[in-house]
Amino acid sequence: MEATCAICGRTILAGERVHDYVEGQEEHSVCELCVARAGSSGWRPADEPAAERSPGPEHEGRRRLRRLWRHRPAPPAQRRPVPPVVNENGLTPFERAVARFNSSEAGRAVVGLTRTLGRPQASVGASAGTPDEVRVTVAWELSWYQWGVDVADELRPVFELGKGGEIDQLDAAAKQWNAAVGKDGRLRLAAEGARSR
């Protein structure tokens, strides 16, 4: 079973640093990106001495309130976030896909993973099945992710197509490294990356 972050739910990649936290009697694994959120939720590092971890009775009410707040259902309007509007006039489908990807949750995940795992290889290409779908592949030495971007539907979020542990699992088209991830963690097409240097 794949390890996931207890806060954001993202799969922990091979080689990625994981932090163990305790909430009450429960232990949780948290990714590097969610450490601050774990601390602000009242979770304590698992390696902290138990005496420092266990809150007194005066903290129990606040902890219970935080737990209720964290597990409350989101209002209907917030369940499916709408991606930010990107000015796509005059852009090619691949450029539109890159702009949408960078402003998505997937793009923010790549920014964080780049800080942890270093700069990956990347490719942007047509996705099988529909002419309006673009496939984004981001690969590190021991793991890779693929996402789909529907360039015909601005409201459809970027969605995960697949993930794996070995670059050899990718098809030849996905390994056409025609894009790059900059030091800032943002995806760029190769020609665009060359212009921005």
Image: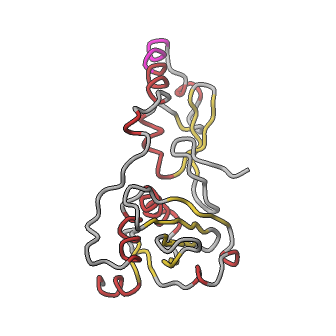
Residue 188 lies, in percent from the top left, at 39, 77
View extreme (right): residue: 1
The vertical placement of 193 against 151, above or below, is below
Hey, which quadrant is residue 153 in on the image? Answer: bottom left
- Numbered range of the magenta stretch: 57-62
- Of 80 and 29, nearer the camera is 80
Dominant SS type (magenta) = helix
Hey, which quadrant is residue 183 in on the image? Answer: bottom left
Q: Is residue 58 magenta?
A: yes
Residue lying at 60% horizontally and 69% vertically, measured from the top left: 144
Residue 48 lies, in percent from the top left, at 56, 35
Residue lying at 43% horizontally and 45% vertically, measured from the top left: 80
The vertical placement of 84 against 58, above or below, is below
View extreme (top): residue: 57
- Residue 166 horizontal side relative to residue 16, left or right: right
Residue lying at 41% horizontally and 72% vertically, measured from the top left: 187
Residue lying at 57% horizontally and 73% vertically, measured from the top left: 139
The vertical placement of 169 against 117, above or below, is below
Residue 166 lies, in percent from the top left, at 69, 72
Q: Quadrant of the C terminus?
A: bottom left
Hey, which quadrant is residue 181 in on the image? Answer: bottom left
